[in-house]
Amino acid sequence: MARLDHGELVVDGLDYDYPGARTALRSVSLRARAGELTAIVGASGSGKSTLLACLGGLLTPKAGSIRLLDGSASRPHRSAIVTQGAPLFDRLTVWENVATAWGTPRRALRDHALDVLAGFDVAEIADAFPRAISFGQRQRVAIAGSVASDSRVLLADEPTGGLDPENSTRVGLALRTAAASSRIVIAVTHDESIAALAHRVLRLHAGVLTERGTA
């Protein structure tokens, strides 16, 4: 796994309005550090997915800034987004899906992909196709693929939606493993098992973000 020595995602005064003047985010500010899993919890409609889309560059906020601080410098960043359902390439095996992070999958990359998969306890399904693995395994493979890439920020949108408690915990541990490679990992979730595993927990309510606590 590639390691990043430091980094911090700094969000200042983020506002986002949907058409019709509905305010989704109001003056949202946060700091998420490399090496930590930051969980943002809240009910449906609280603005969690909107915030994640802004952080990932899928939506442009009305006001505010999003910066990646690397040492004393501020620079653009690449984000990987893991969503419910963890879309994978159905015609590629698990290890080939991970190897796409380095270009066209080649047999020479298999051992490297296996090393990454082992970190998420899914190396044993390396030669399986996505249709043959469980939903929880798909989520962990998707997280492994994001770590194999050079993305500095991993964003997870309800990564445990539809999972039972055991698999939810496994996915939460996978997110912590991703953070341990010195990446910035942010998960928006309504799942308290993810919050319990997070280093820092923030709560979003009606577009307003507050600190809930630190694990």
Image (cartoon, grey):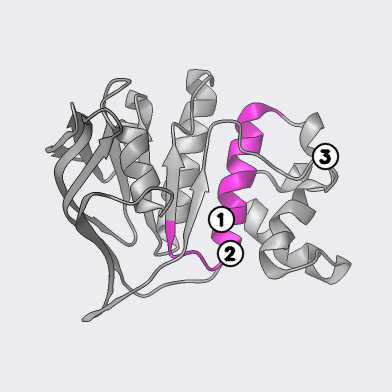
Q: Position of residue 161 (x, y in %)?
A: 49, 24
Q: Is residue 71 left or right of residue 193?
A: left
Mark 3 — residue? Answer: 129
Q: Looking at the image, is mark 3 or mark 1 earlier in the sequence?
A: 3
Quadrant holding the C terminus: top left
Residue 89 visible:
yes
Q: What secondary structure predominates along the stretch shown in magenta? A: helix
The vertical placement of 123 against 193, above or below, is: below
Q: Earlier in the sequence, mark 3 or mark 2?
A: 3
Amino acid type, label 2: Ser
Verify whether residue 135 appears in magenta.
yes
Is 176 within the magenta? no
- Magenta residues (range): 134-153
Alpha-carbon span between mark 3 and mark 2: 20 Å
The kind of residue tagged 3 is Phe
Q: Quadrant of the N terminus?
A: bottom right
